[in-house]
Image (tube, grey):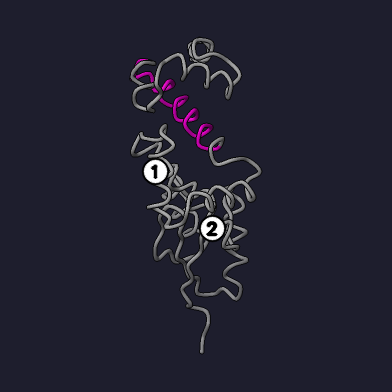
Amino acid sequence: MDNSFIVKTFRIKNLRCTSTILLLKDYLIHAGFMVHDIKPGILVVSKSSSENLSQELKEVLSKYGLAILESKEKQLVEDIKLAIYELIYQLNNVNSIIQRSDYLVEKLGRSYQLLSKVFSEQENTTLEKYIIQQKIQRVRELIEEDEYTLSEIAYMMEYSSVQYLSNQFKKIIGVSVSEYKKDLVFKS
């Protein structure tokens, strides 16, 4: 049996946004891979002349800050991150612990306690801290886009007030929202 055309599915770390997916697909095709499917967190490829498909793929992925997830725990953490990304960037609904935990439990089919435990063990931070960091990153992007007021951003990200958003922003970023906006103006 000729193993040179075996199609393999890989779980990929940090493969989330559409632009990364499109760029990676182009890079892989250019490197001689056949891309059968590519979507957040998942890549299905083959390569006609490859004796060690996994190793060749690892080399290409490492150039772009991506990696193959091999352990079940790391795959679960990536699933959690993908679900959080979806919540923050597509659903804009992440502030309530009940809503967030229910969403993760329903999406991943595991208890919130297990998800939180595995995440903390693998990432050296709590799931709650990670979610807050991702929310603040999204807030930064919304501020940079300059399409919404801070009140609108606070509402979109389900903060109870602009003050609460501002306090959390300063705690994570190290500067106030107004200082951050001022720096953006100077950089333009």
Check disc 2: other Cα within 10 Å, few if <14, some if 14-19, many if 20+: some
Q: Which residues are magenta?
A: 130-149
| Residue drawn at the location 62% of the way across and 46% of the way down | 123
Which quadrant of the structure image shows residue 147?
top left
In this rendering, is residue 37 above or below 148?
Answer: below
Q: Which residue is mark 2?
A: 75
Report the residue that reaches farthest toward the bottom.
1
Residue 66 in the image: state x and y as whole percent. Answer: 57, 51
Check disc 1: other Cα within 10 Å, few if <14, some if 14-19, many if 20+: some
In this rendering, is residue 132 above or below 76?
Answer: above
First of labels 2, 1 by sequence position:
2
Foreground pick, 143 / 5? 143
| Residue drawn at the location 47% of the way across and 18% of the way down | 164
Residue 83 in the image: state x and y as whole percent. Answer: 43, 47
In the image, is 74 to the left or to the right of 82? Answer: right
- Secondary-structure class at tag 1: helix
Residue 61 in the image: state x and y as whole percent. Answer: 57, 55
Q: Residue 19, which numbered label?
A: none
In this rendering, is residue 156 above or below 64?
Answer: above
Q: CA distance from mark 2 to mark 1?
A: 16 Å
Per the image, is 49 magenta?
no
| Residue drawn at the location 58% of the way across and 15% of the way down | 175
| Residue drawn at the location 48% of the way across and 11% of the way down | 185
Amino acid carrying mark 1 in the image: Glu
Which quadrant of the structure image shows residue 36?
bottom left
Q: Which residue is mark 1?
A: 86
Foreground pick, 24 / 111? 111
Q: Main secondary structure of the magenta part?
A: helix
- Secondary-structure class at tag 2: helix
Amino acid carrying mark 2 in the image: Gln
Per the image, is 134 magenta?
yes
